[in-house]
Image (spheres, grey):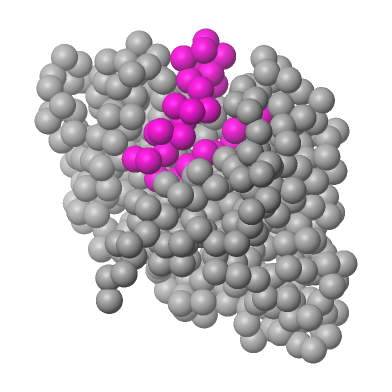
């Protein structure tokens, strides 16, 4: 493919000045054939297979970075949902699997390994109960293992028993990592309509409908979109949408190129490109600043949801023209602690938890990296999860909650997580209780439009 000098210079500028990068290359690995009647044997099989399949993942990504000059920020692994691997194991035995995954992550050199997961949207199996119970200890014993639990789908409704339990699990995980501001909770995400091919953490797992092994790529580029919109200030929204589409096309093309190279060099099928705009705490790499570039004085002002809807839709339209295999989450992320513009909006009083919830109706995921006071009741956290699951269920979209009740912290405090996780301002939570609502349990039925057969 011939590239003109102008296109080459444009790409260099996007990388050097506008924070364009490949956010992650994630290898998905099927581990169902590792299951044995004995947990120690299963763990041995799991370790061996992950190390065998992913031994070249990091070196290959580094080779591609050098060859193409494109930064690949994270190299990750996702596995078959762990609840399908643990059988009749106790929670203590499940932790052995988490520790094994940590060892495999260290051995292969990846940043994170996702898939310590359970899918309980319609009910629990015994293995899922054990795995979910083990989550706080599993996260305490590891630093690279990520957990996700799917509690709802449009087809099945919402498992409110699981919603209740996840509020309690998140509180336990926060207390067990109190010395780091409850940071273990940054590795737990609760989903509705979880995708099976998501390359982003903490929600990545290798779905049962996936191949034996696959490479999925997650692109980024909020800074590139922001800079593109600076060139069309004052233009109408049709021009804004077209500009975002063209920019998303370029970004996704780069992701497609990296995915193709990684697939060929690793000898593993290419799965999908996830074209999500994933921000970082770095100045100039913010989704909030894109929304403000459209004319909002501050992210969170009236009009924010409409601006985000336009952004999310235009990113998808541009991305699907650039790759035949788009999947995962694909859209715009709005994590608070990982986006300097969101942090600024919260600290200035422009952005509230309620406004963020409204924004999740039109964005890719949900309430992401939200820090709340440490004394927030488990039932309130469960109710926040239930609200977000309802948005996903009714709107036939993926939604999620990654919330951190920071022990000992109150509204106005800030918790430092470091790296891509950034720093989280503690946000106010509605003080009225939801205990009786959550205690009802059972299932919230699926919406009528789920009956499409």
Tell me the residue at 62%/22% (across/down).
428
Q: Quadrant of residue 82?
A: bottom right
Is 91 left, or right, of 170 in this rendering? Answer: right
Residue name at image x 31 percent, y 49 percent: 252
- Residue 115: image x %, image y %? 62, 63
Q: Would residue 54 be seen by someone viewing this image from the given angle? A: no
**Viewer-side residue, 57 vs 202:** 202
Quadrant in which residue 442 is drawn:
bottom right
Relative image position of residue 87 (x, y in whole percent): 74, 81
In this picture, is 331 found above or below 452? above
Most extreme residue toward the bottom, as rendered?
37
* Number of numbered discs: 0
Q: Quadrant of the N terminus?
A: bottom left
Q: Nearer the viewer, residue 321 or 72?
A: 321
Q: Residue at x 67, y 75 (%)?
A: 125
Looking at the image, residue 78 sits to the left or right of residue 49; the answer is left
* Start-end of magenta stretch: 343-372
Of residues 431 and 212, which is closer to you in this image? Answer: 431
Q: Within the magenta stretch, is there residue 119?
A: no
- Measured as percent of width and height from the top left, residue 79 is found at 61, 68
Residue 346: say if magenta: yes
Q: Residue at x 20, y 39 (%)?
A: 246
Q: Is residue 162 left or right of residue 444?
A: right
**Which quadrant is home to the C terminus?**
bottom left
């Amino acid at each position: 493919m011939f590239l003109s000098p102008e296109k080459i210079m444009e790409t260099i500028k996007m990388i050097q000045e506008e924070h364009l990068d490949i956010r992650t290359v994630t290898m998905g690995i099927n581990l169902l054939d590792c299951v044995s009647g004995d947990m120690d044997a299963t763990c041995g099989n799991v370790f061996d297979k992950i190390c065998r399949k992913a031994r070249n993942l990091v070196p290959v990504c580094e080779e591609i970075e050098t060859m193409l000059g494109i930064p690949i920020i994270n190299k990750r692994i996702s596995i078959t949902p762990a609840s399908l691997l643990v059988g009749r194991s106790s929670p203590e035995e499940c932790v052995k699997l988490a520790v094994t995954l940590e060892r495999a992550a260290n051995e292969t050199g990846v940043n994170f390994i996702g898939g310590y997961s359970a899918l309980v949207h319609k009910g629990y199996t015994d293995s899922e109960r054990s795995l979910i119970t083990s989550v706080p200890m599993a996260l305490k014993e590891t630093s690279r293992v990520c957990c996700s639990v799917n509690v709802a789908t449009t087809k099945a409704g919402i498992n409110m028993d699981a919603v209740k339990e996840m509020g309690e699990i998140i509180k336990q995980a926060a207390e067990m990592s109190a010395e780091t501001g409850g940071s273990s909770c940054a590795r737990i995400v609760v989903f509705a309509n979880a995708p099976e091919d998501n390359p982003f953490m903490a929600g990545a797992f290798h779905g049962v409908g996936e191949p034996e092994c696959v490479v999925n790529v997650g692109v980024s580029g909020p800074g590139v979109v922001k800079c593109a919109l600076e060139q069309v200030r004052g233009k109408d929204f049709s021009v804004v949408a077209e500009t975002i589409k063209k920019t998303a096309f370029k970004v996704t093309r780069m992701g497609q190129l990296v995915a193709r190279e990684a697939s060929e060099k690793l000898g593993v099928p290419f799965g999908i490109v996830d074209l999500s705009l994933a921000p970082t705490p770095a100045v100039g790499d913010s989704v909030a600043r894109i929304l403000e570039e459209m004319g909002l004085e501050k992210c969170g002002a009236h009009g924010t949801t409409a601006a985000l809807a336009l952004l999310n839709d235009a990113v998808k339209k541009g991305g699907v023209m650039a790759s035949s295999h788009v999947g995962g989450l694909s859209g715009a992320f709005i994590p608070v602690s990982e986006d300097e513009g969101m942090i600024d909006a919260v600290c200035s009083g422009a952005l509230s938890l309620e406004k963020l919830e409204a924004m999740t109706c039109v964005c890719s995921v949900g309430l992401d990296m939200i820090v709340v006071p440490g004394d927030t009741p488990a039932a309130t956290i469960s109710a926040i999860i239930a609200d977000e699951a309802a948005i996903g269920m009714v709107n036939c979209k993926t939604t999620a909650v990654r919330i951190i009740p920071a022990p000992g912290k109150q509204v106005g405090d800030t918790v430092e997580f470091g790296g891509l996780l950034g720093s989280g301002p503690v946000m106010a939570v509605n003080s009225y209780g939801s205990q009786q609502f959550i205690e009802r349990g059972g299932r919230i039925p699926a919406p009528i439009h789920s009956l499409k057969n």
